């Protein structure tokens, strides 16, 4: 596994710093509100687990799983819901928790979709943002770090379902995914 890694971009302590800062801001902004964190599976699961433990107020969590990539490194633009929320978002403030926003197609779809379900508000937070690759404009309230257009893995984020368990975020060697 390690031999496929080109470079570590964010190590565990840097990630901890980024997530702590985001959680602090979210806690301040939503103080005394009914906040529902919606984690987007599977990529955001590690981030959500860390983020929620640093948020200093009661929150609820729920998950959606969507697919836009298949086994490739390029978004197809077609978003499919693989797993929907367990509970209604009605009368809740929803914060969508994403691992990476790349083309923006997934988040754009999710925000539109959840808006139609009667939430009090919908905002988004992402650990990583790749603005160079944006195809649709999306409003990201909380962004952990901006990264260039490179394919990364680790801390929940995969390539072809691998590398999610790496505790750091790293760039893969191009030969791993360019065949
Ligand atoms: P978008 O719809 O193009 O914005 O894609 C968002 C999703 O694509 C993210 O939730 C990730 O799961 C996946 N993704 C985007 N960039 C990367 C990457 O560099 N590595 C792994 N997955 C990525
Ligand atoms: Mg994803």
Image (cartoon, rainbow, N blue to C red):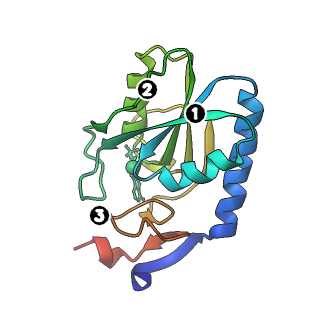
Q: Relative to the observer, which residue lies in front, 103 or 40?
A: 40
Q: In the structure shown, which secondary structural element does the residue marked by tag 1 occupy?
A: strand
Circle nearer the viewer, 2 or 3 = 2
Depth-wise, is mark 3 or mark 1 nearer the camera? 1
Dot 2 crowding, Cα within 10 Å, few <14, some 14–19, many 20+:
few
Q: How many marks?
A: 3
Quarter holding residue 22: top right
Which of the marked residues, 1 or 2, is nearer the chain's N terminus?
1
* Residue 55 placement (x, y as % from top left): 70, 42
Quarter of the N terminus within the rendering: bottom left
Q: Which residue is mark 1?
A: 60
Q: Position of residue 4 (x, y in %)?
A: 39, 80
Quarter of the figure that contains the C terminus: bottom left
Taking the spot 55% from the left edge, 53% from the top edge, the residue there is 47
Residue 160, label in figure: 3
Question: Residue 10 placed where, x, y %?
Answer: 60, 67
Tell me the SS state at disc 2. Answer: loop
The label on residue 87 is: 2
First reached walking from the N terminus: tag 2 or tag 3: 2
Q: Quadrant of residue 79?
A: top left
- Relative image position of residue 111 (x, y in whole percent): 44, 27
- Who is closer to the viewer here, 22 or 129? 22
Callout 3: SS:
loop
Q: Name the residue rendered at 31%, 78% in the picture.
A: 175
Label 1: how many Cα within 10 Å (few below 14, some 14–19, many 20+): few
Q: Earlier in the sequence, mark 3 or mark 1?
A: 1
Contact flag, marks 1 and 2 (Cβ < 8 Å): yes
| Side (left or right) of 36 relative to 104 | right
Residue occupying image coordinates x 46% and y 79%: 6
Residue 142 is left or right of residue 118, and the answer is right
Q: Is mark 2 within 8 Å of ligand 2?
A: no
């Amino acid at each position: 596994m390690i031999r496929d890694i080109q470079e570590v971009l964010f190590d565990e302590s840097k990630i901890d710093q980024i997530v702590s800062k985001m959680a602090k801001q979210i806690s301040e902004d939503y103080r005394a509100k009914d906040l529902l964190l919606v984690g987007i599976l599977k990529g955001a699961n590690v981030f959500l687990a860390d983020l929620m433990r640093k948020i200093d107020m009661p929150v609820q969590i729920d998950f959606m799983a969507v697919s836009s990539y298949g086994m490739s490194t390029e978004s197809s633009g077609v978003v499919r819901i693989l797993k929907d929320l367990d509970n209604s978002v009605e009368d809740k403030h929803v914060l969508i928790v994403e691992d990476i926003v790349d083309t923006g197609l997934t988040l754009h779809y999710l925000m539109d979709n959840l808006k139609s379900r009667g939430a009090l508000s919908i905002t988004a937070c992402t650990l990583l943002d790749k603005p160079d690759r944006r195809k649709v404009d999306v409003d990201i309230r909380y962004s952990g770090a901006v990264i260039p257009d490179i394919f990364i893995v680790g801390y929940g984020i995969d390539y072809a379902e691998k590398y999610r368990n790496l505790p750091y975020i790293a760039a893969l060697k191009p030969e791993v995914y360019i065949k």
